[in-house]
Amino acid sequence: MKFFKSAWNIFLVSIILVLVSTNILSVTNAKFHDHLYGLFSHLPYGELLSQSKSRKYQSLSADNERLRRQNELFSKKEKERKVKLVKAQKISKNIARRTTKNVALNVSAVIPESVPYFGVALIITVTAADIYAGCETMKDTNELLLMLGGTPALSDEATVCGMTLPNVENATDTLGIRFYDFLH
């Protein structure tokens, strides 16, 4: 037993001496370093390193960081999408409400528009309300297009919002209707 113990000690001391001497030689002697490099370059330690726990941990950490950044980006886009959706719903409700009011105004004005002279004034008033509603709808539609990344129809908006109507006197003069003639 004593023999094995002393042999083991000799073995350990010789291993330590070999390691220390090879370290010193690899640092101080370029040829020795090249020979060691040539010797170790044939060993398949690259495969061992690629399957090591630290390599797997580094890969997992990199994937985790990439997914964390991707999740932050998705969260930001989701918040922006929700804000746009709320805004689009508000615009849509405004357009629907405006259209409902406009249709109700037009339907309720059909019979009164047939009354001479007063009908002309009512037609001009209802048409002015139509133009205003159309202008507001164009603005809302362009806002939706901008929000969704489209190109707004600004020239159409300018055309609709820039329309003017004749006043009642000009319209009745053009039609040859006089209020005084209506009373007699």
Image: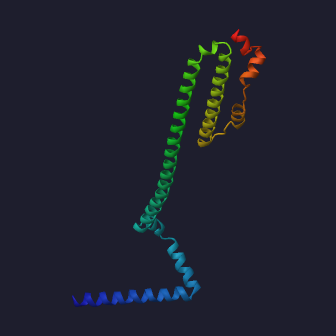
Residue 51 appears in the rendering: no
Viewer-nearest residue: 23 or 42: 23
Residue 175 appears in the rendering: yes
Instruction: Establish if 46 lies above or below 154.
Output: below
Counting labels gives 0
Position of the C terminus, as image quadrant, is top right
Viewer-nearest residue: 72 or 154: 154
Whole-percent x, y for residue 157 in the image: 69, 35
Would you say 6 lies left or right of 85 here?
A: left
Identify the image quadrant of residue 139: top right
Viewer-nearest residue: 8 or 110: 110
Instruction: Establish if 94 lies above or below 10.
Output: above
Position of the N terminus, as image quadrant, is bottom left
The residue furthest left is 1
Q: How is the image coloured?
A: rainbow
Instruction: Establish if 174 lies above or below 73.
Output: above
The residue furthest top is 184
Whole-percent x, y for residue 143 in the image: 61, 40
Would you say 61 lies left or right of 7 here?
A: right
What's the residue at 55%, 80% (across, down)? 35
What's the residue at 46%, 62% (across, down)? 59
What's the residue at 67%, 23% (across, down)? 124
Whole-percent x, y for residue 57 in the image: 42, 65
Instruction: Establish if 184 lies above or below 147.
Output: above
Would you say 139 lies left or right of 4 here?
A: right
Whole-percent x, y for residue 168 in the image: 71, 22
